[in-house]
Image (tube, rainbow, N blue to C red):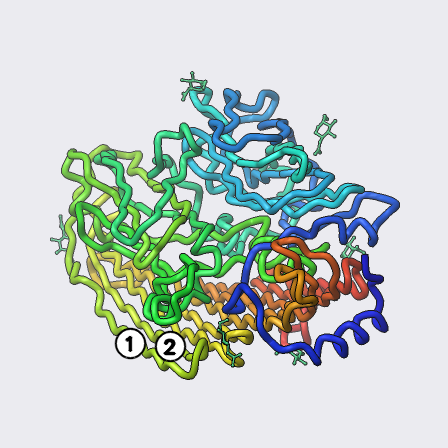
Amino acid sequence: MPEINQNGAVKFFLTLAFLTATTASLPSSPDRFLKSALTSLRSPYKPKKYEELSQPLPSDQLTPSCSHVLLRHSFANTINAPPFTTPYTPPSGCTSPPWSYVVLDLRATSSGDQYDRISGLWLGGVELLRTSTAEPNPTGIFWNVRKDVSRYSSLFMRSDLNVTMMLENIVNDVYTGIYHINVTLHFYESNHIASKPKISSRVGVDGSQRSDQAPADLIIPLCDEGNRGFWFMIESPAETHSKRIQIPSNTRRIVLELYVSFHGNDEFWYSNPPNSYITTNNLATGRGNGAFREVVVKIDGRYVGSEVPFPVIFTGGINPLFWEPVVAIGAFNLPSYDMDLTPFLGLLLDGKSHEFALGVNDGISYWLVDANLHLWLNHESSNVEAGSGRCDSPSRHMVRRAKFEEELDGSFRVEAEVHSEFDGWVKSSEGNLTTVVKSMFKVGNLVKFEQNGSYKRVEQSVKTKRVVEVTSESGEPVKRVVQQRAYPLTVITSTLGELSANDKDMYLLVTNVSHALEEMYSSGEALTELYNRQDSEGWMQVEDHNVLAGEATTRQSFSYVDEFSCYSRNIVAANGEITLNSSSDTCASSSSS
Ligand SMILES: *[C@@H]1O[C@H](CO)[C@@H](O)[C@H](O)[C@H]1NC(C)=O
Ligand SMILES: *[C@@H]1O[C@H](CO)[C@@H](O)[C@H](O)[C@H]1NC(C)=O
Ligand SMILES: *[C@@H]1O[C@H](CO)[C@@H](O)[C@H](O)[C@H]1NC(C)=O
Ligand SMILES: *[C@@H]1O[C@H](CO)[C@@H](O)[C@H](O)[C@H]1NC(C)=O
Ligand SMILES: *[C@@H]1O[C@H](CO)[C@@H](O)[C@H](O)[C@H]1NC(C)=O
Ligand SMILES: *[C@@H]1O[C@H](CO)[C@@H](O)[C@H](O)[C@H]1NC(C)=O
């Protein structure tokens, strides 16, 4: 086992520079790795804490009025098995809703060798959390995920539901890590935070509640049967999964919340070359179809919305040494995506069931996708009328350019832009309100191979904007919500060659990743901004998919500002240890005084 120190690393590089840059497994590409025994050298004494940076929850300083265990389970060799299921009982000793906050608290431990695993948690088929695991080491690791789940409040009083968690894991002589998971719900009552400033405006990127949005009255899942988890598994572009759903006739507002993660040949979809590159070079890889993906939602075969997901990198991804002990953005709490479908109530309120379908444009094996329909009902009367206005198909602009150079080199570009605008009116006891939903996204992607395919550079920019405007019958504005997100991403993977002639599977990979999640959310005058960026660089010695040695540094800056609070955090992790960790909750001088 090579020593992990600066001098050792430098020496390693010099030796390698004289080797020819060829490997058996070309081209160089982001992949999924196992840290193997490497990290055991680093933390021989005590279990290490892993973390995903996030803003504090408003309830963090408060004592819950009650806490309720959802599940405790150890996920060992769960591959090909049904999910873990247990009956849900509503919390006792808590007064009834509305609760100010409900927080989901997941605690996990693991030790041994194990790949990262994807997991979903559902209550009555409604997804509450999409998460993935950190790769453990022999001395053990642990982590904690806290998520505001207040928007699911209407489910928590029901006693006819099961809690379900899917986490397929493999435990054998090689992969020894078992994931031990506890999930608890904490309920906070209104009077417990009456004395606090009302800091309930949350960034919705973690699927949490907004100040302008009381929890829905009813949530209907758009999901699978549940024998293999409630998500739909999508393995080809032609595949759509659907469910017939009847919307109650007194629905006055409907928002679809989409959950999505990507795996297998599409785990790094943003780095996939077009199929022409693969066939021209006679490559064995299944990772093709180009680098554009779009999750599409349809009702009765008609497009109602789509989303280019944030490219979450799991803890084994690209270079697993980057993600210890600070994991990639979204790895423990994958973002969900809201689409306001209120303009379509004119279509949906006819007392009949309608086909809600999910698919992935250009998607290959495999995507895990489901959705929750959040419904707000008219309580005063069961009589809601609605009509749909403009429902044109979206305008699309898409350009793909392929430039082949010598041998394995080439560059491949995708530019895409999609705009849609829908409107409809709903007459309830709130009056006759017209909702206009405008959506836009713009994607630019470059995948470039150089040095006979041993150097690969991926650059992607995704920008999305959604505007929801509600006006009264007399044309008065009632509400205006704007959400803008940007996901810049750069990934470099450079293979430096075989380490010895008789060990073709061993090579050195230099990797760089920069990515960010930026969000601006405004509702009327209230503005929330989130900025979350990670820059990672390093190298690793790899044999097959095992990391034998390496060095890595990740720098992250996180900041969150809303009407009532500011929070920022800077962290640097180098070779598995935190070397800088600063945080602040004071607002910059720009704030009014
Ligand atoms: C889960 O809860 C049990 C009982 O309180 C405790 O013994 C165990 O350590 C917990 N496990 C985790 C992963 O927090
Ligand atoms: C809950 O799970 C049990 C065991 O899998 C099953 O028999 C029961 O029908 C489920 N209940 C609901 C409401 O889905
Ligand atoms: C480029 O890579 C291919 C595939 O590994 C190999 O056959 C070819 O010899 C390489 N060319 C050079 C100039 O190294
Ligand atoms: C509601 O308002 C829209 C647009 O102003 C109008 O077209 C529609 O007829 C109204 N509906 C009812 C039931 O008054
Ligand atoms: C990775 O990033 C570092 C720092 O920005 C840079 O010096 C290095 O050249 C990059 N590596 C590659 C392979 O591009
Ligand atoms: C880093 O700082 C945060 C916030 O100040 C603190 O809660 C956390 O315990 C620190 N972590 C480490 C590993 O020092």
Does the residue at mark 1 contact the one at mark 2 (Cβ under 8 Å)?
A: yes
**Residue 381 at x, y percent in the picture:** 24, 34
The residue positioned farthest toward the right in the image shown: 45
From the viewer's side, name the closer residue of 377 and 350: 350
Dot 1 falls on a residue whose secondary structure is: strand
Residue marked by disc 2: 413
Q: Is residue 326 above or below residue 128?
A: below
Dot label at residue 399: 1
Dot label at residue 577: none
**Residue under the point 62% across and 59% down:** 505
From the viewer's side, name the closer residue of 382 and 439: 439
Q: Is residue 88 visible?
A: yes
**Residue under the point 28% across and 51% down:** 297
From the viewer's side, name the closer residue of 171 and 573: 171
Q: Amino acid at mark 2?
A: Arg
Q: Is residue 288 left or right of residue 140?
A: left
Q: Amino acid at mark 1?
A: Val
